[in-house]
Image (spheres, helix red, strand yellow):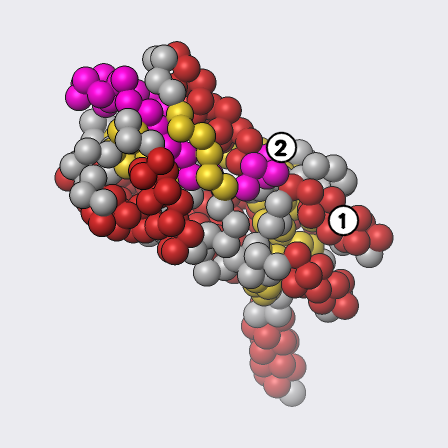
C-alpha cells in the first residue's frame, strides 16, 4: 500500500512539472518578417526554460487584426503579453485594453507613444544607425565617391525606432558633408515595394552612390533594381538588421555593412522580465540593447554574438 502511494505521488510530481505555470502570448506586427520570427524563437526558448506556455498571434500589419489579437488574449485569460506593435501610436490603445483587463505587458521593440507597461525592451537605434552611417561614409571616402548622395528606404517614421534610426544615420552623413536624396517610407514591406522605391530613387537621383535600407529582409529588391538599371557596380548597399546570408555577403563586399539588432536576445529578455514580475524580483523598466555595426573589417570578431543573439543559431 505504501509503495502504491509513493508511486502515485511520484507520478503526480512528474505531471505537475510539465504543466505550464503561466500563460503568455506574443502579439507581433508580422511574424512572416524574419526579424520577428527570430524574436519569437527567443521568447519560446526562454518561456520553455521557466515553464511558461506561449502562443504567437500575428497581426499581419493590420491594425484591426492587432486589436482583435489583444481582445483574443484577454478572452483567453493570459497572464502576460509580449507586444511588438505595428507602430508606436497603435500601442497606446492596446496598452489601455490590457490595463483594463489587469494583464501586464512587456513591449519588445517598436515602442509606444504612451500608456503603462511592465518593461520596454529596445535597441539603441540612434547609436546603431550612427555607427552604421560612419561605416558607409568611411567607405565612400575610400572610394572617393563622397560627393555622391545616399538614398534611404525607411520603416514608417511614425515609429519611435524609425525616427531614431533616421536621426542617427543622418547625423553621420552630416558630419561628412554627405547629402541624402530624401526618404521613401515602407508601407507593406514587400519585395515589390523595395524594388520600386529603389528604382525610383536611382532614376530620380543620377548622383546617388549608396542606398540604405532601414529594414533588411527585402534587400534583394534593391539589388535587383540596381541590376536592372545597370548600377550594380556603381551604388553601395547598406542595411539595418540582418539576414543569415549577410555573413557571406559582407566579407564578399556585396554589402558594405549592417546594423544588427539582437532579436533573439530581445525575446529572451522579454520573458525574463515576466519571470521577475511573477516572482517579485526587481524589474528593469527600460532595457536598451546594443546594436552591432558590422562591416568586412570587424565581422570575424563579432561572429559568435551574431549567430547566437541575432540569428538565434546555437
Residue under label 1, please give it. Answer: 93
Distance from disc 2 to disc 1, alpha carbons, whole Å, reads: 20 Å
In the image shown, does 311 or 241 lie closer to the viewer?
241
Q: Residue at x 36, y 13 (%)?
A: 177
Residue 164 screen position, x and y as percent: 53, 29
In the image shown, does 186 or 201 lie closer to the viewer?
201
**Label 2 SS:** strand
Residue under label 2, please give it. Answer: 286
| Dot 2 and dot 1 residues touching (CB under 8 Å) | no
Asked if residue 133 shows in the view, the reply is yes
Residue most extreme to the right:
100
**Label 1 SS:** helix
Magenta stretch: give its range.
133-160
Residue 117, numbered label: none
Label 2: how many residues lie within 10 Å, few (<14), some (14-19) or many (20+)?
few
Q: Residue at x 46, y 34 (%)?
A: 183
**Which tag, 2 or 1, sits closer to the chain's start?**
1
In this picture, residue 14 sits left or right of residue 196: right
Above or below for 63 versus 179? below
Observer-side mark, 2 or 1, equals: 1
In the image shown, does 247 or 254 lie closer to the viewer?
254
Above or below for 280 versus 15? above
Amino acid at each position: 500500500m505504501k509503495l502504491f502511494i509513493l508511486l502515485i505521488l511520484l507520478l503526480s510530481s512528474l505531471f505537475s512539472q510539465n504543466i505550464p505555470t503561466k500563460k503568455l502570448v506574443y502579439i507581433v506586427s508580422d511574424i512572416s518578417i524574419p526579424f520577428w520570427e527570430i524574436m519569437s524563437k527567443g521568447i519560446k526558448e526562454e518561456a520553455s526554460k521557466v515553464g511558461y506556455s506561449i502562443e504567437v498571434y500575428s497581426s499581419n500589419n493590420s491594425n484591426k487584426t492587432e486589436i482583435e489579437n489583444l481582445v483574443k488574449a484577454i478572452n483567453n485569460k493570459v497572464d502576460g503579453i509580449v507586444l511588438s506593435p505595428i507602430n508606436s501610436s497603435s500601442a497606446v490603445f492596446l496598452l489601455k485594453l490590457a490595463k483594463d483587463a489587469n494583464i501586464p505587458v512587456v513591449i519588445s521593440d517598436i515602442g509606444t507613444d504612451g500608456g503603462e507597461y511592465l518593461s520596454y525592451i529596445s535597441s539603441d537605434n540612434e547609436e546603431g544607425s550612427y555607427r552604421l552611417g560612419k561605416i558607409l561614409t568611411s567607405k565612400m571616402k575610400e572610394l572617393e565617391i563622397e560627393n555622391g548622395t545616399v538614398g534611404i528606404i525607411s520603416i514608417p517614421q511614425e515609429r519611435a525606432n524609425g525616427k531614431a534610426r533616421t536621426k542617427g544615420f543622418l547625423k553621420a552623413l552630416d558630419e561628412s558633408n554627405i547629402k541624402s536624396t530624401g526618404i521613401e517610407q515602407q508601407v507593406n514591406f514587400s519585395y515589390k515595394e523595395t524594388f520600386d522605391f529603389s528604382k525610383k530613387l536611382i532614376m530620380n537621383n543620377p548622383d546617388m552612390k549608396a542606398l540604405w535600407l532601414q529594414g533588411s529582409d527585402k534587400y534583394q529588391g534593391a539589388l535587383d533594381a540596381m541590376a536592372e538599371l545597370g548600377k550594380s557596380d556603381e551604388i553601395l548597399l547598406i542595411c539595418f538588421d540582418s539576414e543569415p546570408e549577410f555573413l557571406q555577403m559582407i566579407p564578399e563586399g556585396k554589402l558594405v555593412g549592417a546594423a544588427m539588432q539582437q532579436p533573439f536576445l530581445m525575446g529572451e529578455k522579454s520573458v525574463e522580465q515576466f519571470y521577475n514580475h511573477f516572482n517579485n524580483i526587481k524589474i528593469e523598466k527600460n532595457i536598451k540593447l546594443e546594436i552591432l555595426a558590422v562591416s568586412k573589417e570587424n565581422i570575424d570578431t563579432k561572429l559568435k554574438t551574431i549567430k547566437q543573439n541575432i540569428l538565434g543559431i546555437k
